[in-house]
Amino acid sequence: MKVWTVVNQKGGVGKTTSAVSLAGGLSALGHKVLVVDLDPQASLTHYLCPTFDELALSAYDVFIASSREKTFQTLIRDTIVASSIKNVDILPSHMALATLDNSLSEQSGKGLIVKNMMKFLQASSANDKSYDYAIIDCQPVLGVLMVNALVAANVIVLPTQTEYLSLLGLDKMLATIKQMHASLQSGVVSVVVPTLFDRRVNACLSAYSDMRNKHKDKLWRGYIPVDTKFRDASAAGLPINEYAKNARGTFAYEKLITALVKYD
C-alpha cells in the first residue's frame, strides 16, 4: 500500500479537494483506497461520509488506543467505514483530534501511530481491510497529527495556491519537511501542486513563475485550475471525476495521478 499525504501549513489551498479528487481518480482506475481524515475540522469526513453524525468512532479513538496493541488493531477495523465513493473507505475525523497534542504529550512513539496503522493494514491478518493506496488529509498546523501524516508518507503532496501568501506557506512547509528528514521514510518524495490557477490573473501567473524558478526540482509541471465544478461536486458529495467527467478539474487531477503513480 502506498501512502500519499496531502499537506500544507497554510489553509485554503485545496488540500481536501485534492484528497477527494485523488481518491476518486484512483478509484476510477480500479484501485481500493483508504482516506484518512486527520483534520479536526473534519471537512473530508463531511464530504465523503453522509452518516457522519451517526458514527460512534473516529481517528481520535484510534490515536488514544495506540498504546494498547490489541485494542488499537480492533479499533482500526471498527472505525474504518465505507465512503460515498465506490472502492473508497474512510477513517473519519472528530473535533477531539484537536486535543491530541496534550493528550499524547507523555506517550512515546506518538509520531508513529499512523505509520503503525498502515503496517497493520498491510499485514496478512488484515486482508479484509486491504488497500492499494491511502490518502491522508491533515490540518494546516505543525503538531502530532501533521508529524504522523508526514512520517507515514511515501509521497508528500503539497497543494499550493498560486498567490503570494501561499508561496510563503510553501517555504515554511518545505522547511518543516527538511527538518524532519531523518524521521521520514526512505525515498519519500515531495511534490508541489499549483492550485486555484487562473491564467487570466497576473498574480497567478507571477506566483506560478516563482514556483517554477524556486522549486523546479519538486514542482509538478501541471496545475489545478479554478473550476466551479469543484464546488458543485462538493455539494453533491462526489469527487469531481464522478460529478463532471469532462471538467477541466477532472482532467487536471487525472494528469496529476499519472505523475504521482510514477513514484510508486
Image: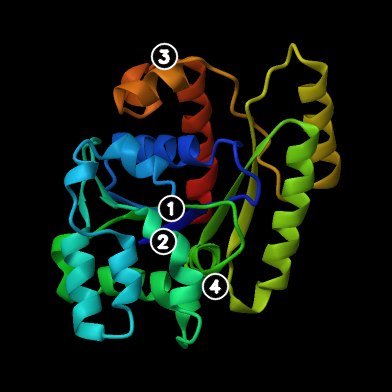
Say whether marks 1 and 3 touch (CB < 8 Å).
no
- Tag 2 residue: 97
Of mark 2 and mark 3, the one earlier in the sequence is: 2
Q: Residue at x 22, y 35 (%)?
A: 50
Marks 2 and 3, how far apart at CA: 37 Å
Q: Which is in the foreground here, disc 4 or disc 2?
A: 2
- Residue underneath mark 1: 40
| Secondary element at image label 1 | loop
Instruction: Tell me if label 2 and label 3 are in contact, CB under 8 Å.
Output: no
Tag of residue 246: 3
Q: Earlier in the sequence, mark 4 or mark 3?
A: 4
- Kindly identify the amino acid type of the residue bearing the numbered disc 4: Gln
Q: Is residue 50 left or right of residue 201?
A: left
Task: Say whether marks 1 and 2 touch (CB < 8 Å).
Answer: yes
Cα gap from disc 1 to disc 2, whole angstroms: 5 Å
Residue type (three-letter) at the residue carrying disc 3: Asn
